[in-house]
Every structure is written in C-alpha cells, then in structure tokens.
Amino acid sequence: MQIFEKMGFSWNRAAVPAGRGTSVERAAFRYKQSIAEFVYDAGALEGNPFTYPEVQTLLEGITVGGRKLADQQQIHNLGEAANKLFKLVHDGEFRVERPVSDELHRLVAKGEALDPGHFRGEGDPLNLTVWPSDCLGREERHWPLPTKEGAPDLNRVYVEGIKALASEVSNALERGMAYFLFGALQQFHFDGNKRTSRFMMNGILMSLGVDAISIPAARLQDFNEKMVRFHTDKDATEMMRFLIECQPKNAP
C-alpha cells in the first residue's frame, strides 16, 4: 500500500475499530477538563518527577518548591501546548499542517530542544552536525534521516506522509494514531517528537469528533517496550492496539 511506503511503517488496518464518536465541542470540553491529567501523563513519560497534585498546582500559576527548574519548565511547556491545542480545536482552527505542528513543537520544546519550532536543519546552522538517533536498548538504535540544511528530505517525507493520511485513511482514530507514530519514527525535530506528535494526534481526533488519548503514567514501561518493537520492526499494529486501550472508557 502507498500509505505504508509514505509513512515508513505498516499496520493491520483491519484491526483498527472506528473511534468512539462524539461532537467536536464535547471532545474539546472533555480534553479541557482533563488537561492536568494529560500534562502529568506526558511529563511522566519523559521521566518528569512532578506528581499529579504538583502539576495541578503549577498549572494554576503557583510555583512548586523543591523541584528542578528544568522539570518545572517542561511541565509549564506541556501546559501551554495543551491549552493551545484546546483553543485551536475549539475555534475550528486545527489543521494537519506544518504551521500548527511547528507552533506546538515550539511550545513543547522551548528551552529544552535545539531549534524549537523548526525541523532539523532549518534553524541554527551550527546544529547541522548533530546526528539524531533513538536508543532502543543496550545494542540497538534507530537512525532517522540525517540532518541537512533546509531539511529538504524531512519536508518531503512530511508532506508525502500527511497527504497519504488525508487521502487514504478516513478512520479518525486510525489517522490520529498513524500520525503520532509517523512523527515519533521520522523524528522531524531534534527533540520533543513524541510529545508534539501526540498533541497532533489528539488534535486530529478531537477535530473529527473523537475523544483525545492520554497514555497513563502507570503504563510507562509498557509504552516504552512497545515503542522499541515498533522502531525495530516498523510494524505499528501492537502500538495502535495499545493506544486504543488507552482511550477514555467514558466515551458515549
């Protein structure tokens, strides 16, 4: 299938059910009500030590003592990105396109990643020598496309990938999950790829009337193990089943 070629991985399309549908307004409202939970889970997946009550406190604008500034900044960034995503969906302005992804990445990776808001190779020329990789274990690594000035290959892969998603995948749940894994695998940015891609996934879901998905902090090890197998085998079926398990159980 062309979609598999453009995304860089395959999956069992017959195994993906239709997403539990609701209205865009209701999906966005539920997301807004659960932003602290989404931020806490996303931080925990990055190894952030903030507890759920501490995340709630920080998102209310109150400083939390005894925590590293870097950890506090990461939670603050996630909160800003979550609120931005809600506004985009609520106002009908969410789009699966570079400007939206770039803005979410800029918020997510501010003060943490090289060239936030840019693909690898589009920012500071001094960063062109940075070679990205994902460590999958003691001996394995996933090597994405190299960093080149202007990011021509990354831009081509991104454009072809989202065009294939739009034209070949009508199932909202399948499209959102595939986008997340696409961004995680291709590593368009120096860092913050999984976080940014999950925000984009949830934007896709909510804008098509499906509830957003958060990966619970308690399932961190399960998530990491399945992501390693996905990167190694380039088969997304297991990860998609995992994400489906993480869907809200209170959907109508």
Image (spheres, rainbow, N blue to C red):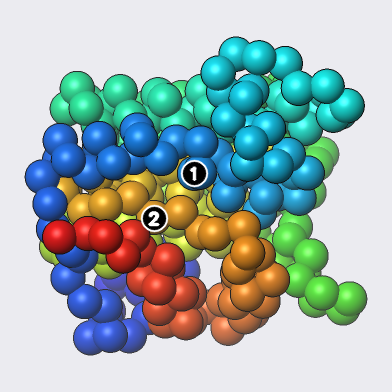
Count residues near mark 1 (Cα–Cα under 10 Å), then give few for <14, some for 14-19, many for 20+. many
| Mark 2 secondary-structure assignment | loop
Tell me which corner region of the image, top left, top right, bottom left or bottom right, holds residue 107.
top right
- Residue holding disc 1: 38
Tell me which corner region of the image, top left, top right, bottom left or bottom right, holds residue 174.
bottom left
Residue 121 makes an appearance in the image? no
Q: Position of residue 15 (x, y in %)?
A: 28, 85
Q: Is residue 179 above or below residue 28?
A: below
Residue 244 makes an appearance in the image? yes
Mark 2: amino acid: Ile
Q: Residue at x 42, y 66 (%)?
A: 246
Q: Quadrant of the C terminus?
A: bottom left
Q: Nearer the viewer, residue 91 or 12?
A: 91
Say whether disc 1 or disc 2 marks the residue closer to the N-terminus.
1
Q: Nearer the viewer, residue 35 or 92?
A: 35
Q: Residue furthest front?
A: 53
| Mark 1 secondary-structure assignment | helix
- Residue holding disc 2: 213
Q: CA distance from mark 1 to mark 2?
A: 8 Å
Q: Residue at x 72, y 16 (%)?
A: 63
Mark 1: amino acid: Phe
Q: Position of residue 122 (x, y in %)?
A: 60, 28
Q: Position of residue 53 (x, y in %)?
A: 64, 36
Q: Residue at x 79, y 65 (%)?
A: 135
164 sits to left or right of 188: left
Q: Is residue 7 above or below residue 146?
A: below
